[in-house]
Image (spheres, grey):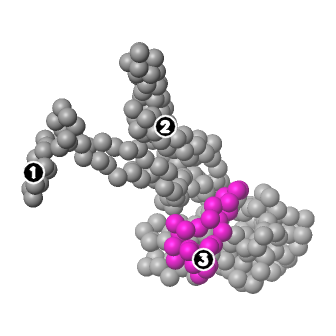
Amino acid sequence: MLRGLYTGSSGMIMNQYKLDVISNNLANVDKTGFKADEAIFKSFPEMVLHRTREDGLGYTPAGSFDLAPTVGKLGLGSEFNESFTRFEQGAAKQTGNPMDFMIDDRGNERPSFFVVRTDKGDRLTRGGSFILDREGFLVNPDGHPLMGENGPIKVAKFNFLVKENGEVWINQAVGNEPGAGANETSNQWQNPVLLDKIKVRTVEFPRELKKEGNGFYEDTPESGPMVVPQERNDPTLLQGFVEASNVNLVSQMVQMIEVQRQYEANQKSVTTHDQLLGRLINEVAR
């Protein structure tokens, strides 16, 4: 009787964890570069039940095997094991903004990331929406600079071009001071100069990355340090595009409904066991 209470309550706790993960995915469905999480659970070992005689003894003759008929298996519940991030490529959304970038690494074994410098050190991110600060550096909406191979990248508003390999070129004829660029529709490029190359990194075990707020990931001893991607296909940088979230809205809503029903089933199981236990104590004990 008590075992049924513990099994039902463990199912309720498991579904609560899963609902938290699904809710977080749905809350970030419109966040640029967001990667969905998935909860993993593991079951406790099962027990095989055998029928016994009326006196409570089994059917095991001396020196023989248990001859009692098998009733079935008894599950003992499950527990939350881990939550991991799915790094599948999100859809490309064209914005036309020259300060929006997207990493296209479909077909590669490990995902690639932009490197952004924060107060806590360099962090990895898939969010490619950037703006210019007052000094002309490319920064994310929170003010953290986008890193190039030579440090933070400083450009003029409409005076730079990012190639597919990540190289940042500027128009030397116009200048490289904030606000000194040509207008947005200007195609007059004279004496282009290679300024820097956007820093793109990956890790050996992306599943072990530590997920932080604002779409940041921190490398850990388990994930390995940041390294240059060595894949069959080099990651491609697209200017004027951003990567949408890889959250499947319909799938997440279906999972939420399933979790709610499973939670209710476990709740009814706990209520039923509690009522039976009450009858056992109040009526049978008399």
Q: Which of marks 2 and 3 is in front?
A: 2
Q: With 186 as the anchor, is 108 left or right in this view? A: left
Q: Which mark is residue 221?
A: 3
Amino acid of disc 1: Pro
The image shows residue 46 at horizontal and vertical percentages of: 31, 49
Q: Name the residue under label 2.
A: 9
Quarter of the rendering containing residue 73: top left
Q: Name the residue under label 1.
A: 61
Range covered by the magenta-colored residues: 201-227
Q: Which residue is drawn at 16% across and 36% down?
A: 53
Q: Could you tell which of marks 3 and 1 lies nearer the N-terminus?
A: 1
Residue closest to the eye, 201 or 77: 77
Q: With 213 as the anchor, is 50 left or right in this view? A: left
The image shows residue 11 at horizontal and vertical percentages of: 45, 39
Q: Which residue is drawn at 79% across and 76% down?
A: 152
Secondary element under disc 1, as helix, strand or loop, is loop
